[in-house]
Amino acid sequence: MEENGEDLAVTNDKLSQLSVAEDGGLNLGEKKKKKKKKPLADAEEALTEVTEGAADDDAADAGQLLDMSLTKKKKKKKPKARADEDAVEVDETAEGEADGEAAEASGSGLPWDGSDRDYHYEEMLDRVFGILRENNPELTGEKRRTIMKPPQVAREGTKKTVFTNYMELCKTMNRQPEHVQLFLLAELGTSGSLDGQQRLVVKGRFQPKAFEGVLRRYVNEYVGCNSCKSIDTLLDRDSATRIISLRCQQCNASRTVAPIKAGFVARTSRRIKT
Amino acid sequence: MTEVDSLQSGLGLDPFVEDGEDDSGKDYVHIRIQQRNGKKSLTTIQGLEKSFDYKKVLKAFKKEFCCNGNVVEDAELGKVIQLQGDQRKNVSVFLTGNNLAKKDLIKIHGF
Ligand SMILES: [Zn+2]
């Protein structure tokens, strides 16, 4: 039992190292994603090794213990099914490891396997979602991470900055380049225009980070759905009321957004002699 | 004072105002930055409460941040305070710290 525990600790270490790897992508959209997938698979593997390595009765013992532990402390067990899903990113290693335990403890991935105790509500919920995820992933309402490329920025001369993949990012967000431009320029407090190659040329020196921050805000404000965090949304303008609303293509939620004109383009720059 | 409070909370709970619609009109304090030559920049504060004595506020800013600044009158936006340098953080801290503006009503723009 004890050596088993030690091995587990080692596995944990490995796992936490694993989780450090990050994608460089600009990750707009949901930040508090809880689901981690890859480490789950890894944890399972590692754990399998561990238990196999131990003596027979020890292994049984371990199984029992794992089973216990999962009944009392786990809130978010996910059945095995998720391990196969594409990996994205990790932030809570501990939980991923716990999931591995859960799946390991019972053959079929069901926590109540091999015991005749009552089912817990959360376990059943997890099972349902596991099945749903397996067969109809789109119904789980799960938040897909939206990854956007980081903005590429070049200096033009000493006073201008060129946002080279501007069009591409507009396409990713599915927004009119004009709208994005309006927002960007208003937020950066500068002027600019599109050049012949459809790049956005902005007056002033800006780091890529500056664009990234502003774009992030743009997505929060004008792209992301508040209810389901999807960025599969459309902006509609009601010509009568001139209210702009954001409608989600995924969950059909809609909300009104502030017009950029009034909210942001209220620029003070005109009065300032530069 | 209580009057103002109740008024504001009333606004916050207005059932006819949809979420996210609020920006356009209300009492947001916008703090913006603008680039000037080289690494110089300029901070503008727009939308402070009208009842404030802008000159006094400006004076306090100037003293606190050791920068120059002035008050500009804009036809649409009313009085706007300008400060030299990037004082966005400072201003926001100062405003909240002295209860001149509510934290969630301050909008910092720029990068
Ligand atoms: Zn939605």
Image (spheres, rainbow, N blue to C red):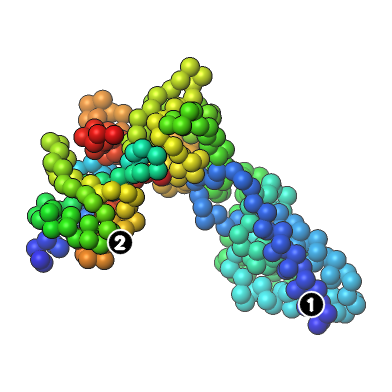
Q: In the rendered view, would you say A39 is above or below A189?
A: below
Q: Amino acid at mark 2?
A: Val
Q: From this viewpoint, is residue B30 visible?
A: no
| Residue contact at pointers 2 and 1, CB within 8 angstroms | no
Which part of the image, by quadrant, shows the N terminus of chain A?
A: bottom right
Q: Which mark is residue B93?
A: 2
Q: Position of residue A15 (x, y in %)?
A: 72, 63
Q: Which mark is residue A6?
A: 1
Which part of the image, by quadrant, shows the C terminus of chain A?
A: top left
Name the chain letter of the residue that bears numbered label 2.
Answer: B
Q: From this viewpoint, is residue A93 visible?
A: yes
Q: Position of residue B74 (x, y in %)?
A: 15, 38
Q: Position of residue A164 (x, y in %)?
A: 53, 29
- Residue at x 50% of width, y 32% of height: A155
State left or right for residue A49 relative to residue A146.
Answer: right
Q: Amino acid at mark 1?
A: Glu
The tally of labels here is 2
State left or right for residue B27 relative to residue A161.
Answer: left
To the question of a shared chain for discs 2 and 1, the answer is no
